[in-house]
Image (cartoon, grey):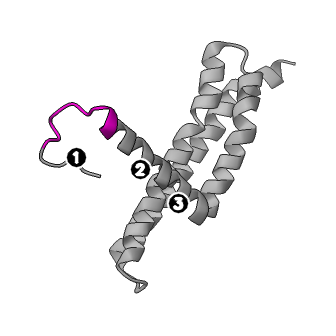
Amino acid sequence: MADGKYSNLPRGPVGAWHALVWSLKGIASTWRLESSFRLEVYLFAVLAPLGLWLGQTGIERAVLFGCLVPVMSAELLNSAIEAVIERYGDEHHELAGRAKDMGSAAVFVLMMNVLACWGLVLVPRWLAH
């Protein structure tokens, strides 16, 4: 939600609370409506502790854990794009299809980043043994 005409003023506790509630509503509706998001949360629930366990240094743990979060964030944004497009109807439009494909591609690129990060951290260790 836009802050309105007073958006240059500092946000107080009530405004911060409203922002938190809106964010949680967004996460809840994405969870309810998007199977891809649920799958990514399940993968996060497995991979995050695994990454913290497999990482031997703080930097490795940060890389293995930290590369997972942007995937879910991009899925939230992709779901938002799809919701806006679907609001305007089911008929095919080239630009709508392109926007949906680009949102999906953003999630894919971040998933490839997860594979690269995990591979760059873990594969040399496995090859050394």
Asked whether 10 falls inside the magenta stretch, the response is: yes
Depth check: 111 or 5 in front? 5
From the viewer's perspective, is 48 left or right of 63? Answer: right
Q: In the figure, 103 relative to 11: above or below?
A: below
Is disc 2 in contact with disc 1, using a CB cutoff of under 8 Å? no
Residue 80 in sight = yes
Instruction: Tell me which amino acid carries mark 3.
Output: Ser
- Residue 116 falls in which quadrant of the image? top right
Q: Secondary structure at mark 3?
A: helix
In terms of sequence position, does the residue under pointer 2 or pointer 1 come before the other?
Answer: 1
- Residue at point 65% right, 20% down? 60
Q: Secondary structure at mark 2?
A: helix
Q: In the figure, 57 relative to 78: above or below?
A: above
Q: Main secondary structure of the magenta part?
A: loop
- Residue at point 44% right, 47% down? 21
Q: Determine which of the numbered discs, if any, sits on residue 29 in the image.
A: 3
**Where's residue 36, x and y in %?**
62, 59
Q: Secondary structure at mark 1?
A: loop
- Residue at point 82% right, 24% down? 126
Q: CA distance from mark 2 to mark 1?
A: 13 Å
Depth check: 24 or 64 in front? 24
**Where's residue 70, x and y in %?**
52, 41
- Residue at point 62% right, 39% down? 114
**Residue at the outermost right position:** 129
In terms of sequence position, does the residue under pointer 2 or pointer 3 come before the other?
Answer: 2
Q: CA distance from mark 1 to mark 3?
A: 22 Å
What residue does disc 2 label? 22
Instruction: Tell me which amino acid carries mark 2.
Output: Trp
Q: In the figure, 103 relative to 116: above or below?
A: below
Using a 10 Å C-alpha cutoff, classify the residue at mark 2 as few (fewer than 14 neighbours), some (14 to 19) or many (20 or more).
Answer: few
Range of magenta residues: 6-15
